[in-house]
Amino acid sequence: MSPGLARPGQRRLVHGMGKTLVAADWPPLTDEDVSAVLGGGTSGAVVTWHSPRPWSAAGLVSWRGARVFVKRHHVSVRTVGQLAAEHAFARHLRDRGVPVPAVLRLANGTTATRRGDFVYEAHQLAAGTDLYRDAVSWTPFAGPGHARAAGEALARLHLAAAGFAAPEHPPAVLTGGCAVTVAADPLGRLSQIVASRPALACYLAGRPWRDDARAHLLPALERAGPLCRRLPRQWGHGDWHPSNLTWTGSGPDARVAGVLDLGLANRTFAVHDLATAIERSAVAWLDLAETGHASVDAAGLDALLDGYASVRPLPAAEAAALAEVLPVVHLEFALSEVEYFAAVTGSAANAELAYDGYLIGHARWFAGPDGSAVLDHLRRRARR
């Protein structure tokens, strides 16, 4: 077990792999922690709210008459260097009008610092109302108005991101990307990634992963690859969903006020990021795990795409690629999640869920009747 994992007495409840809250893997932030990071131990910072998100410990902190957001990662999940690239992207977007909260300088003068087994960062509080902060993964937008506003905001982010030239993050724990999707030999590239990640390779040694990839991932990869390889590469958000946005109000016509959490940002391509937004909000994946059926928020899907196109109309090549990349847009993050559970938190049950239910299960759903209907709908939109 990682030395940073929470002991039973430290655990709070956070979002799990399903709809119920579970005990946190990581110990909660303490006033002592945040005081040391923000003010060198003399600031008297107080943690006033703990985030229910599971991959790190984070929360709102009262400090010097203001509220800030502090996040703490285990070193096996994020390094200072990884956060520095994320913060550079945040500054790039903010300078171009995207409402990303400013990254704060910590007591040592940097924007990310390591203390023991943990790495810390801090941000200004986002503008607006955090309507979805308690929503679990894959929660749909509350209505088409929110979905359309989210589409518009994502398009603005892509326009602002176009000039950010940092290289892509390589595969790592809890990261996403498109290296497999754009590879001329996707299974070969997948094998290279597995070989480069010893802990992931160790887990997959007990699974028929090559056969599963060939049966459930390769057909979509072969459709997506030729289309996606022609698209310009650029950085994207990587995890666009309702709870990573704040809002101007609580009504159905609320607009996006702030953009949160660039932790999965990477250099992919715009339609990869748009497909991620669809995958995160339009399909009731948690119902699929419980009942074998996942409903689709068709109105939200169309509103998201209409909002996006009103700001950044999709060129024909991107529109054609959207349906083909959607069934595998989750691939690299799902692999990294398998590694996280297998090697970092040591949860064999969650690693199995990430592999069977997420990596393979989502791709299998898109090959079935309900998923195929979604893809056909996107293809019809592209032809229009």
Image: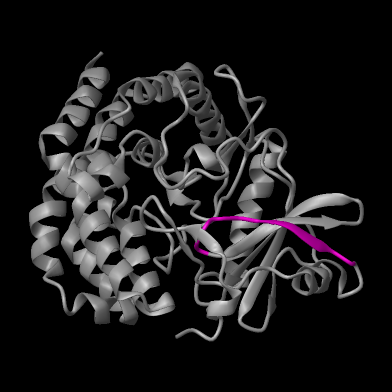
Name which residue lies at 51% across and 35% down.
158
**Residue placed most toward the observer, 144 or 149:** 144
**Residue placed most toward the observer, 315 or 148:** 148
Tell me, yes or no, whether the highlighted magenta stretch contains residue 46. Answer: yes
Vertical side of 64 occupied by 251: above or below:
above
Numbered range of the magenta stretch: 44-55
Vertical side of 161 occupied by 303: above or below:
above
Name which residue lies at 32% across and 67% down.
350
Looking at the rendered structure, the number of numbered marks drawn on it comes to 0
Vertical side of 245 occupied by 183: above or below:
below
Name which residue lies at 42% across and 58% down.
16
Q: Position of residue 166 (x, y in %)?
A: 55, 55
Determine the image quadrant of residue 341.
bottom left
Which quadrant does the C terminus fall into?
top left
**Residue placed most toward the observer, 162 or 265:** 265
**Residue placed most toward the observer, 147 or 24:** 24
Q: Which residue ends up furthest to the front in the rendered image?
A: 9
Name which residue lies at 27% across and 43% down.
287
Determine the image quadrant of residue 107.
bottom right
Q: Which residue ends up furthest to the top in the rendered image?
A: 384
Which quadrant does the N terminus fall into?
bottom left
Colouring = one colour
Question: Would residue 379 be visible to someone looking at this image?
Answer: yes
Horizontal placement of 47 versus 332: left or right? right
Horizontal placement of 274 versus 73: left or right? left
Q: Position of residue 222 (x, y in %)?
A: 14, 47
Vertical side of 2 occupied by 328: above or below:
above
Horizontal placement of 199 versus 183: left or right? right
Q: Position of residue 345 (x, y in %)?
A: 43, 76
Q: Position of residue 263 (x, y in %)?
A: 54, 56
Question: Would residue 6 be visible to someone looking at this image?
Answer: no
Tell me, yes or no, whether the highlighted magenta stretch contains residue 346. Answer: no
